[in-house]
Image (cartoon, helix red, strand yellow):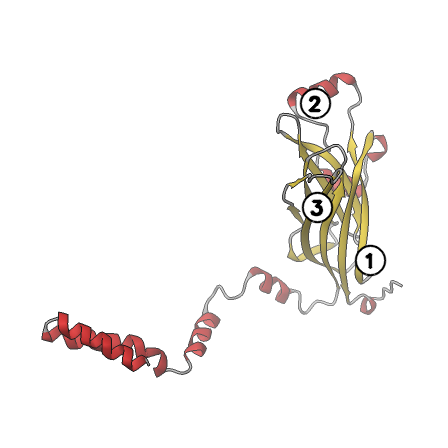
Amino acid sequence: MISGLGDSLALDVKETLPPTKKSRMARSVFNRIKSPLKNKDNDNDINNIIDKSPTKLSSIDKSEKSYASKKGIFLDIQGVIKEGTFPEDDQIFCKYDVVFDKEWEIVTGQNSGQSQHACLGEGTAGYFVWNMPFQIRLYTEDPKNWPQLVISCYCPDFLGREVLKAYGTCYIPTMNGTHERNLSMFCPISSDEFTKIYEIVYGEKAELINAPKIMALGEGREILRTKSEGRIKIKFNINLENLEENGYDIK
């Protein structure tokens, strides 16, 4: 079939080009058509080119290889911020932060991210769905200060400005398998009426400075005035490696 196609193209060339250019053009057409058949290992050649490319190893691959010889504990966290209930709002989005101390290192993945805006549907009564996935792999040789997940929710005010809705936090599950957590969300409230008026006018509600760290460590939260703002459901898939080899047993 290929040679037939080449013959038809060659005939067209002979009718339109001078004698010196006819043969050159015909040969080039045949070469282009038949070149894939000359080398049956064409796919292997492409793979060899990819193998020699300096961009083959991504940063993730390099990071994995750098930890391959280490004998510490690996914690694989895969999860989904599934849904939430906030009866007073029409639109909400979430930010997440996986917070850990200096004993832990990131092997792959991201420790923070943001979901899409979820809008209230008809007859859903404050029910929002995000299905926001997140994934991170951590490494430690001393599993102190177990990692936590901190959720921050935001919503538009009556002028469309994004303001804080609520915070929530939970510890990453410590056992392999699938787990679900229901986070009770809360929001800081101002201590006086003048500040509340200022927040409404300028769209700047009371927020925590470096909120993920304060939420995870709990420093100063005993003097924080808050109010309840809803709930969020989160699903975790956890995989712990080398736990028993390092003298730990969680049952």
Along the line of sight, which residue is nearer the eye, 6 or 51? 6
- How packed is label 2: few (under 14 Cα within 10 Å), some, or many (20 or more)? some
| Residue under label 1 | 174
Horizontal and vertical percent for residue 137? 69, 59
Amino acid type indicated by mark 2: Glu
Q: Are marks 3 and 1 in contact (CB under 8 Å)?
A: no
When the figure is inspected, residue 41 is found, relative to residue 188, above or below; the finding is: below
Q: CA distance from mark 2 to mark 3?
A: 28 Å
Of pointers 3 and 1, the one earlier in the residue sequence = 3
Query: Can residue 153 be seen?
Result: yes
Quarter-of-image position of residue 230: top right
Left or right of residue 115: residue 193: right
Horizontal and vertical percent for residue 109? 64, 56
| Residue under label 2 | 199
Quarter-of-image position of residue 202: top right
Along the line of sight, which residue is nearer the eye, 179 or 247? 179
SS state under label 1:
loop
Q: Residue at x 77, y 35 (%)?
A: 87
Which residue of the protein is positioned furthest toward the top in this rendering? 194
Which residue of the protein is positioned furthest toward the front in this rendering? 123
Left or right of residue 22: residue 8: right
Question: Which callout, 2 or 1, points to the residue nearer the camera?
Answer: 2
Amino acid type indicated by mark 3: Val
